[in-house]
Every structure is written in C-alpha cells, then in structure tokens.
Amino acid sequence: MEIKNLSLTYNASTINEVNVFNNINFDVYRNETLAIIGPSGCGKSSLIRIISGLVEKTSGSIILNGKDDFKNSFFGYVDQGSILMPNLNVFNNILLPFKIRKIKFNKCNIENILDIIGLKEATNMYPYQLSGGMKQRVAIARELVLHPEVLLLDEPFSDLDEMIREKLQKELFQIKKTINQTILIVTHNIEEAVFLADRIIIMSNKPSYLKSIINVKLMRSDKKEEYDIIKNVRKILYE
Amino acid sequence: MNNKIIDILKKVIASLLVIVILISFWQIVEDNVNQIREENKETSLEYFIPSPKSIMYSFVADFNIIQNAILSTLIKAIPGFIVGVFLAILMAILYIIIPSFRNATFGIAYALNSFPLVGLAPIIILMFGQGSFLSIMFVVMLVSYFPMLITLDGALNQTPREYIELMKINKATKFKTLIYARIPLAMPQFFVSLRLSIPSSIVGAIIGEWMGASEGIGRLMILSVYQMEAGRLYACMFAVAIICATTAILIEYISRKVLFWNNTK
C-alpha cells in the first residue's frame, strides 16, 4: 500500500481551518507491521481513519496493489473502544462482518481464529461477561477472520491495564507471526511500537509531517539492543 | 434460596409494608375525622373520600361490574395500543431510512402531540361517533403513538458513533445499520417507553369513555360520581392501578428476558 501526498485539513477555507498534516508519504509492505507514533494531536488516528475510509482526506492518494480504487478490498479496523455488539455472543460478533457483507463463512476458520486468540472457551459468552482484554481480543479476531488487506489498529491497548496490555502485545506478536498479516498500528507507546513493529513512522507536531522512518527489523538484525532502538526513537520524537 | 429470590422478596416485603402503613394511617385518620364530624352532626367524609375499608367493601361487592367494565375498556385499549406502537415503530424506521421524510414531518408530529387530548375530543367524536369502539381505540392509539415515536426516534438516532463506524467499515447499507446496530441498541429505551405507555394508554381509554361511552371503566367511574358511590369510584381506580402495575411488571419481566445482554450493573 502506498500513501502519496496525503493531507488533511478540517474546515478548509473557513475561519476555523485546522491543518492536521501535509504531504504524508510512505509505503506499507505486505506482511509487515508498521507503527505510527507522534505527539498527541498530530493526526496519527486521523491518518489511520482516512485509510479505513471513516474520514475523508483533503488531498493525496492511497494506492493498494497498484489501484487507488479499493472499494472491494477490506481493511480491518480496531480502536481502543473494543466495540462489540452487546446483543451478540462472541461467535456471532465475529460472524457479524460476514452477515453484513453477505459472505459465506467457514465455521472452522472462526474456530481457528478463536483458538489462536485463546477464546475458544468463550465462544458462547456475551460482551458483558468478558473482561476488557477479552473484548479487545474478540474485536481483533472479528477483523482478522476476514483476512483484511491491512489490519488497522488505533491505539488498541491504550484502555487496558499494564499487565493485560503486555499480554495482548505478545499475543498480537504471535498472531502476526502465525498468519502473516499486514498491520498498521497507531500508538503513543514507544516500547509497544518497538516491540511489535518492523518499521516505525515518527510524525511531528501539528501541522505534522513525516519526521522519520526507522527500520526496527534492520536494527534488530544488526544485533542492536531493544533499549538502544527505543532510545533512538525517543531522540527523534522529542528533538 | 438464592440471593436473587431473597432480594426480590425483600423488595416485595418493603413495598407491602409501605402500603400497609399508608392504608392504616388513612383508615385511622378517616375514622377519627368521621367521629368528630358525627359529633358535630356533619356529613360523613365517606361520601367524598371513602376509607380503605369502604373501598375494599365496594371492590368486593361490585367486583363483577368492575371486572366487566375493565374488560370492556381493555378490549378497546389493547388494539389501540398495539396499532399506536406499531405505527410509531414503522414511522421511526422510516425516519432513519428517509431522513428528508423525517425533516418534513417530525415538526408536524410534535405540533399534533401538543394538542390537548380533551381538545381533540369533539373532532374524534365527529369522526368516529360518540363513545364508539373506534373513537376509544383512536384516542388510545394517539396517546401511545407520540411518546413511543419520540422515544424511538431519539433512541435510533443516538446510536454511539463507534457502532455506526463499525457498520461503515463493513460497508453496511442504511438498512443493515438499522438492523444490526440501531435497533438492538435502541431496545432498552423501547422497553422503557413501552412500560410508560401502558398506564397512559389506559388513562387515554378512560378519557375516551368519559366522552360518552355506554360501557367501560371510564363510564363506570362517571356513573359512580353521579350516583355518589365514592367507594365504587375509588374501587375502579384501584382496579385500574392493579391492571397498570401488573402490565408494567409483565413488560419488565419480558424486557429482562429479551435484554439479558444489557447488563449495565
């Protein structure tokens, strides 16, 4: 996926005009995990919401597999709210995209995903019976089961406590290795970004621009310590 | 016995205790006031405000008359209530699917709702005849339709943004968003409105019967006033209260069963 000259301005040409970001350019490679970090209000979430189709871009283009029209492609999107339909059990929540899109589903696929995220026992449970961490796992599973082109995660673990967050980060890491999923994750947590991502995009303050792209995978293969990578990212972010 | 049953029993006993205390207080005050009035050779208060004992006596003595009157009212009120609720649901759904239709008619609905029911009486009598089945049914329909429409319209339009976005991500149409997100999330408010509409529709039916029905609980109440049968008048009100409370409990029970997933505690 290529992001080309993407800009976002709210209330353009009015007195309340807010220029969020300008001319953002980057590529997302197949099966990689790309993290976006930056200061609060720099437009990280807006960027991911534009890709998901929830927010209209002001200018620029998003090209997926060489085409800028990807109406039939599917992007999975999960934010920190772990939005599940309260009237449906775990299985039917995961089934929901299939029903809406009228796609035939394979029960084994759903059971397989539930197994991967460790929720096989909770198949018949309702959201009110689940913990925050379990809800977030179901929300991620619901998106993964449709094999999205890109899984977009908008600070998915920020509402969870430290212990659960670490557990889910490890689980996401395992999922990514197991099913080779392209993931674009927005986070304000540098450690999380370094742990999960192959590359990290660092954005500046508003009106933001792309400050730097750090290749974590390359740094790891150069035997660089995790601590040094975090130090490096922090330096660029705050300079 | 599990904790749930103990909790329910506690609530029932507490409510009964309050009722018994209030009724006893009423009886004692009434007895004392009547004694003083008798000594002063004044008319007994029983003619205007009957004591709980007289009300219970009338309730037992006139049970068959009250029962028939209630049944006659319910036969007219229930279809009116069902039609009113059904139309409100239909209209609220149309408002979501065709917003321009909502913009064009919602103001009119509000304006109609602000007409006092008693003011509409002559129009309804002209349309359907004095005290006829249709006129009572129409009054009940009006009384249940508007509050239900306004509640449902609000509930269907207040679906949290995150759920609408979940539908948008999955490329759901307006209709599918309505089926999979708006309606399920509006159900708790629908049941609250349903519970509140029942007493008001029975009141609507009674007002409808006051316009000149030949039978029904409203008619019996008016007759009781003219015949100075205060005990029977209060007994009628007691019977209406029992019907309303029973229906509200039934709706509450159904809503708990249907909305078991709405665990907000």
Image: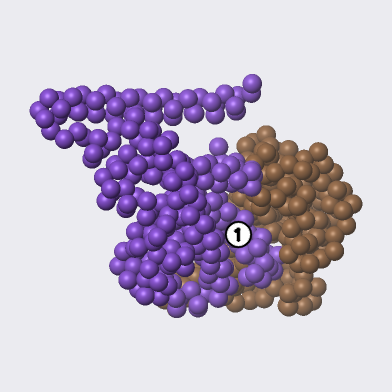
Chain colours: A brown, B purple
Examine the rendered structure and indicate whether residue B37 appears above or below residue A195. above
Relative to B246, A116 lies left or right: right
Relative to B115, A4 lies left or right: right
Residue in front for this viewpoint, B84 or A173: B84
Q: Position of residue B54 (x, y in %)?
A: 33, 33
Relative to B42, A233 lies left or right: right
Give amino acid for label 1.
Answer: Ile
Quarter occupied by the C terminus of chain B = top right
Quarter occupied by the N terminus of chain B = top right
Residue in front for this viewpoint, A137 or B154: B154
Give the number of marks.
1
SS under mark 1: helix
Residue at the image position 44 percent from the left and 76 percent from the top: B105
Q: Quadrant of residue A117?
A: top right
Examine the rendered structure and indicate whether residue B119 appears above or below residue A214. below
Residue at the image position 23 percent from the left and 39 percent from the top: B47
Residue in front for this viewpoint, B20 or A36: B20
Q: Quadrant of residue A158?
A: top right
Q: Quadrant of residue A214?
A: bottom right
Q: Position of residue B228 (x, y in %)?
A: 26, 45
Residue at the image position 88 percent from the left and 57 percent from the top: A106
- Residue lying furthest top: B1
Q: Which residue is mark 1?
A: B183
